[in-house]
Image: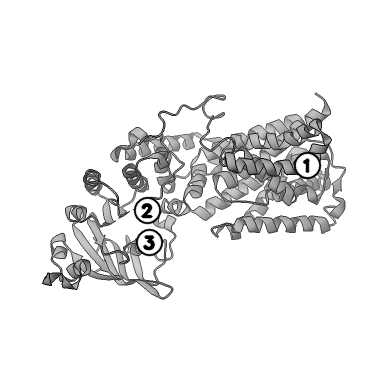
Amino acid sequence: MTTATNLLEGQSLSMVFGGLSALDSVDINIKKGEVLSLIGPNGAGKTTLFNLLTGVYSPTRGKIRFKQRELRNMKPYDITKMGIARTFQNIRLFGNMTVLDNVTIGQHCRTKTGIFGAIFKTPSVRTEEKKTREKAMEVLKLVELDDVWDEKAKNLPYGKQRRLEMARALATDPELILLDEPAAGMNPQETNELIGLIDKLNDMGKTVLLIEHDMKLVMDISQRIMVLDYGKKIADGTPEEVRNDEKVIKAYLGDTHKGE
Amino acid sequence: MNAYYLQILTVIGINIILAASLNLISGYTGQLSLGHATFMGIGAYSATLISIHLGLPFIISLIIGGVVAAIFGFIIGVPTLRLKGDYLAIATLGFGEIMKNINLNLKITGGPMGLRGIPQATNIYIVIAAVVLTIFAINRIINSRVGKSFIAIREDELAAEAMGINTTHYKILSFVIGAFFAGIAGGLYAFFFRYIHPSNFGFMKSIEILCMVVLGGMGNTYGAVLGAIIITVLPEFLRTVSPVISQYRMVFYGLLLVIMMIVRPQGILSQDFDFTLFNHGLLGYKKKKGGQIQ
């Protein structure tokens, strides 16, 4: 099971919130370079799993290894530095900052200007700031937000805010990027653009794990799909396999659908 | 210029440093501190005692006063800034009372007699230089990687952490920098009035500084400057209008803040208002293209 191609390995992850089990011994393996989707009904534990992988919560039981290193007890900012970035289900941008600054912040863990550097603005600080700005503009171009770089993030329309969140995550230079319902609230055209964007990221060599309810998107771009239900993994396989899985159909449509 | 105006100008300068440094903590980093005057007091007492007992020159004592205040900022910040929420406000409040009582009871601080006979060393030029340096440094910080991390923490702490920002580290840093400048302001105060007493740096002074920041505009350095000027000049102005009104100046403060909160809760200069004095030419308005899209 432990192979070098696994970028991330989670073993029997469990999370209990005050007696309520949100995740129950879930195994998750993410191979380098793949697009893996995490689906399941509401409350299945998908976001909880995200929060475990990004260090927001520490798992009650189980191990997480990323690039052969144990993530348990690591803080979210350390995990980001190791190369895992994320977006949030309910957009969490820095609303009063400009689009450019939001992306600049993403590069925080890859830059190192300190307090004295900031005050004296030494040549090396200027160079770093220039590089940071250029890289930020590059990322904004990728998500096609470069024309609104000096808008405040909170003034952007919804679809653009979603893209900005992805840009901000990308700016941290991740190997693995976790997208929490990136298509939520998007219209079909925006969803299509999003599919193109995720494809582009994958082509760039980024490994993508996403939570999504939009089945068209999931079936379109996933190389593999993992299904959670009531905190347990009920299926894990190619889109084709998952689509025909008895347990998955049951979880989504209920027991009685066959009779109808 | 006569001594009266010179004194008002000096006090304005000291208050600007206090307001701008509190604004860094509360306005930019979003951490409510109710004990900013405490750090001013620590700076005032440390600078004075160092100058008197060690005979160090004024400027050196001033800087050491700031450093001592920063160290205390670190000591109080480490346990409280790890927590989320309003713990900092409560802890700074308590810390202020503790320091006041310590100063009231120690022999070396003169106890309830205060410290008197401090040499007159602060003059208007030093105050102006200190104000310019403070505003310059805070501006540089705000526009840097460090300052952007402060603002990100204010905007969304969880997202900031997900972007790789060690939020505890940066909250403490902001608090320590703010305490340092407050300590400098305290030193300037001590060497100007030549007499310090624990009650000069009590809760009321902390609230006064907070009023300046809230009135001028949280998260805008120039707002803090404006707030400091208004809150300093207003009581003097009221005094000239009528000594009776002047007695009720605290009522005026209160009324002013209530009206502000109703009419313009973001303060006189909101955080969007951005004429960048030191970054884009003197008083040049930075042009923003377009308004809101959508």
Q: Which residue is pictured at 44% across the width and 60% down the height? A: A75
Disc 1 sits on a residue from what chain? B
Q: Chain of mark 3?
A: A
Single out the mark in the foreground, 1 or 3.
Answer: 1
Q: Is residue B233 left or right of residue B89?
A: right
Q: Chain of mark 2?
A: A
Name the residue located 29 percent from the left edge and 65 percent from the top edge. Answer: A9
| Residue at the spot of label 3 | A51
Could you tell me residue A83's position as x and y percent? 35, 53
Q: Amino acid at mark 2?
A: Asn
Q: Which residue is mark 1?
A: B248
Q: Quadrant of residue B92?
A: bottom right
Q: Are marks 3 and 2 on the same chain?
A: yes
In the rendered image, which residue does mark 2 sit on?
A90
Taking the spot 67% from the left edge, 54% from the top edge, the residue there is B72
When the figure is inspected, residue A22 is found, relative to residue B3, above or below; the finding is: below
Image coordinates for residue A228, horizontal then vertical, percent: 26, 67
Amino acid under disc 1: Tyr
Give the SS element for disc 2.
Answer: loop
Image position of A155 with respect to A40: above or below: above
* Horizontal relation, residue B182 to residue B29: left or right: right
Quadrant (top left, top right, bottom left, bottom right) of the C terminus of chain B: top left
x, y (%) of residue A71? Answer: 38, 63
Label 1: which secondary element: loop
Label 3 amino acid?
Answer: Asn
